[in-house]
Structures are given as C-alpha cells and as structure tokens.
Amino acid sequence: MALNPEQVQLIKATVPVLKEHGVTITKVFYSNMLDANPELKTIFNHSNKVNGNQPMALAGALLAYATYIDDLGVLSPAVERICHKHASLYIQPEHYQIVGKYLLEAMGQVLGDALTPPLLEAWGAAYWQLANVMIGKEADLYKSANGWTQFRDFRVARKEPESDEITSFYLEPVDGKPLPTFLPGQYVSIQVPVPELTYAQCRQYSLSDEPQPTYYRISVRRDPGVLDAAAAHPGYVSNILHDTVNAGDIVQLSHPYGDFHLDNPAAEHPLVLLSAGVGLTPLTSMLNSLTTADALPSRPIHFVHGARTSAARAFKAHVQSLSTTLPTLHTTFFTSHPTDQDKQGVDYDYQGRVDISKLDDTQGLFLHNHATEYYICGPTAFMLDTQKALLAKGVDGSRIKMELFGTGGVPAA
C-alpha cells in the first residue's frame, strides 16, 4: 500500500531523529532479531556486526530512505545492488516479515513515546512499500537463475596461489551439470562452516575468470584481521579458505549475481580498467572475457593496477602475457612499496598508489573519446578518489562504474 501525503511528511520529519539515533536503533534491531532468530546468523556477516559496519550501513540506508521517500528514483541503484546481494544469500519473503517486526520494535524501544502511533503506522507502510519492491526484484532474479534457487555443492578442483596474499580456487559443480554463464564482473556467495562461531558464514567473491562451462574461479585475499571492541581477529571465511579448504573439499556456492559488470563486451570504444589490491579480480574476469571477443583487436584497453608490493600483486604475468600478444592492450602497474630488488619499468611502472594524473590523457585515459568507459574496483577511498579525478577531467559520471565489497555502497558522485 502506497504512503499517503501525510505519511510521507511524517517520514521526512524523522530525518533529524535518524541522524541522531539511527545507529542505536539498528544495533538494537540486530541484537534483538538475531537473539530471537539465531538461524539468521548464517546470513549476516558476523565481522560486520561486531565492528559496527552492519548497523552503520543499515542506519545510513534508513536515513537515505527517509530523505528521498518522495523521490525514490534516487535510490534505485542502491536498491538494485542490495537485491543482487540478497539473491546471492537466498533471502526469502518470510525474512522481510522478521526484519520488519524487529526493526519497528527497535524504533519503539529507542525512541519511546516519540514514536507516536501515526509515525509507527507511517514507518510500517514505508517499510512494506520498499520491501515489496525488493521482494519482486529478487523474485525476478531467482527466475533468471533457471532453477538454481539454493546453495549448490561445489568441489575444489584446484587451489593455486596467485601472490603472497591471494589464492585462486577452481570450483566444479558436484552434480556435473553445465554451469550457467555470467556477466564478467559479477560475484558468487560462498558458504562455509565456521567452527569458531558454530555456524556457517557467507561471503561474496568476484568471479575472476571468463565464463567457463565446467568451473568457476574465485581469487581470495587473506584478510589479516579487523579490529573490534574485543581484539583483532582475522577474516573468518578468507582464512578458512586459505588454511583449511583444499583440493577435493566441498563448499557451497550461489548462482552468480551482481550489478557491476561489463556492459557491452562487443563494443569497440576504449575501456579503462582501474583497480587496487584484490579489486583486480572482477576486472581480470572482464579482461579475460575480452581476449576472446572478436572486437578486441580494434578496441583499446588499458589495465591499471596498484599493489602494496610486487609480491602482493596477483595475475601480473598473465596480464603482461596478454599485452605482449594484443597490441590494443596496455598495462600500467603502481607499487606503493617497491623493494630494492624491484626494477622500475620491469616490476612496476610508478611508485606509489594509483594516480591517474600520471596517465596520459589521450593514450592512457582516452579522454578524446567520449564513449570511453571506466571500471573501478578496490578500497572505497581509492574508488572515490579515482572517480573524483575522472570527473574533474570532464568524464561523464554515467561512464564511471564502481564496485564495493562488504557492507554498504559507494556514495553517489
């Protein structure tokens, strides 16, 4: 049921309240909901709950929803991104019932008498207005999966170190059925038991190779740890994958999802792939896919990557081998901390973090072509800085695509 004008104004009037109390509300919400429904702990990222990222992200989403309740088109990209992540976790309509109940109760618990009956009714209507949109979008995503509507068993066929930090896992379906294709840049959710927590956890990892009918490849960076109120602990899933999952072991995977992907592989306009750290994984999938495209010889591509050290950089030999045989592919590597053994011009091109001011506007960024697309993946600060620099050079924001792993999203330009 759509909100009436009075309810819209009530929701907008809560913006200052959400700015002040939003994180408190969402912390109470997660605590109460997961205490009463422990089976949902598998869905939610435990680390993001402990370090506060999950409550902060939800509080930000509530604030954005209240702010744009009368202009919801502004939120469409964020809703699309969230629905893809939900689909990769197999969120069901009944989950929305649970979330709605505990979210409204948390508002009442924190706000007390300030949550008047009319305001509570308005937020209930607002919640279900958005929930029904998301349920519908997720139903469409499930239909597009052609029957793959729950986690599926995959066997680790190969496990290959790509750098000091990143390891690739080649995953084949246990049932032996052909795998559906995916759009280069998309991800899968992987689910593994976490003995320390006594329940499974899910994480999203980009598919790092071009689509293959018999396997998917993910390339996982070992997460050294996040700081929480108790202690620094390593990322649960990444370290389990690195330390205990080996060839022959079984993991569970979702169907590929994600709204960050190569839009038109057959296009001929230039393409700039900009990444830092493990952010190169979806862009490597794009690059590998393009190497088999008929249009590649006439399509200029620039692959730009930044790493802390040469030893931490994955896929360098592979990418360089492509550039030696494909004249339209150029590469630029930045290294923040080169060693005495590293040679500039061989192991890296520039010292420091990725800085597009060091790239030639014409040969490196193709600014003369107003169809050039820019795909960016890496730490949030890197993406926002790179986006800002491109916009300052006159690039239209619609041609800049960014991806973010973890909770939340990239703020709009």
Image: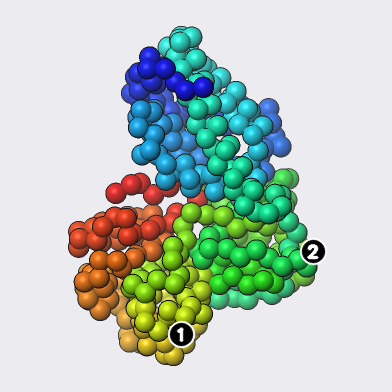
Crowdedness near tag 2: few (<14), some (14–19) or many (≥20) residues, C-alpha within 10 Å: few
Determine if residue 30 is in view.
Answer: yes
Classify residue 374 by image quadrant.
Answer: bottom left
Where is residue 46 shown, x and y percent of the image? Answer: 60, 44
Where is residue 268 shown, x and y percent of the image? Answer: 37, 74
Q: In the rendering, which numbered label is found on residue 76?
A: none
Secondary structure state at the residue bearing disc 2: loop
Secondary structure state at the residue bearing disc 1: helix
- Give the residue drawn at x 59%, y 75%: 161
- Give the residue drawn at x 35%, y 32%: 71
* 376, 73: nearer the viewer: 73
Crowdedness near tag 1: few (<14), some (14–19) or many (≥20) residues, C-alpha within 10 Å: some
Going by the numbered disc 1, the residue's amino acid type is: Leu
- Give the residue drawn at x 39%, y 34%: 72
Determine if residue 192 is in view.
Answer: no
- Relative to residue 217, is residue 73 depicted above or below? above
Where is residue 13 shown, x and y percent of the image? Answer: 34, 19
Q: Which residue is mark 1?
A: 322
* 409, 161: nearer the viewer: 409
* 236, 45: nearer the viewer: 45
Going by the numbered disc 2, the residue's amino acid type is: Asp
Q: Which residue is mark 2?
A: 175
Where is residue 164 shown, x and y percent of the image? Answer: 53, 74
* 146, 95: nearer the viewer: 146
Q: Is residue 174 left or right of residue 60?
A: right
Q: Residues under labels 2 and 1: Cα distance?
A: 34 Å
